[in-house]
Image (spheres, rainbow, N blue to C red):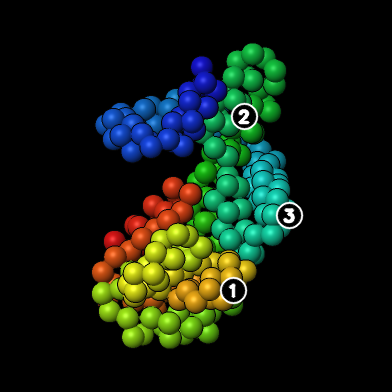
Amino acid sequence: MALGAFVGGMLISETIYRHQVEADIRPFRDILLGLFFVTVGMMLDLRFVFENLDLLALAVLLLIGGKALVILVLTWFLKTPLFTSLRTAAQLAQAGEFGLVLINLAFALHLIPLDVFQITLSAMLLSMFIAPFLIKKAASLAVDLGRGDKAHSAGIIQAVVERSADLHDHVLLRHGRTAIADMLRIEAVPFVALDADPQCIRVAQARGLNVALGNADRAEVLDAAGLGRAKVLVVSSPDSHSAERVIRMAR
């Protein structure tokens, strides 16, 4: 049942109805989460924890370090920037609520002994407690690493400013590879488009389109493109989550 609810929730979260579902369940969410964690906490044997602090420390280190290492390897394989990989690893390194469900089920079915259950449960809860501090530290480190990122460097920001400096009441377009950019050019409507793909930018600029390199989900890039002076913002992206991120940033 827990797995079915988990998969069902993931499927719903990918649909256009996710906001309505979230609004419907919000009154019950905090109560049920509180009940869940109180139930989990009641299964924890504090005496066992204090008697096995060295083993618990090792378990937490293996849990957080192991998951973070796996995520770093996967993101490296996918050629993700290092600062993004660090933030992703920090946010996913701790145990999740569904892991608590699984470990409790394994113990109830006598698949693991009591001492293994207690040390695993303790390590999972402690990793959740550590998570906010780890995420904050990783975010700070990622910012330092990201200062040299090509898409957000001072030179890129300056290039965006130069392409939008003389524009007023213009259209700010995310992605310069759409029919909208062609239509705006034909109708002589002033616009500047932002794109993160250098190859697409070269093709668009060769066609005479006013396209600049930059990620539109960054506030400094939107400011450089003259969002405050723009009349319209057009977000054309097949990725709804990415589009929502840009819209939230713009608002």
Classify mark 3: helix, strand or loop: helix
Asked if the residue under mark 1 is in contact with the one under mark 3, i.e. CB atoms within 8 Å, the reply is no
Where's the C terminus, which quadrant? bottom left
Q: Nearer the viewer, mark 3 or mark 2?
A: 3
Position of 76 with respect to 131 (left or right) is right
Report x, y in % for residue 52: 66, 38
Q: Is residue 223 visible?
A: no
The image quarter in which residue 82 lies: bottom right
Q: Is residue 78 visible?
A: yes
Position of 167 with respect to 68 (left or right) is left
Classify mark 1: helix, strand or loop: helix
- The residues tagged by marks 3 and 1 sit, at their Cα atoms, a distance apart of 27 Å
Question: Please, which residue is most extreme toward the front here?
Answer: 186
* Residue found 48% across the figure and 49% down from its top: 238
Numbered badge on residue 202: 1
Considering only order in the chain, which callout, 1 or 3, is on the residue closer to the N terminus?
A: 3
| Residue hosting label 3 | 77
Disc 1 crowd rating (10 Å Cα; few below 14, some 14-19, many 20+) is some
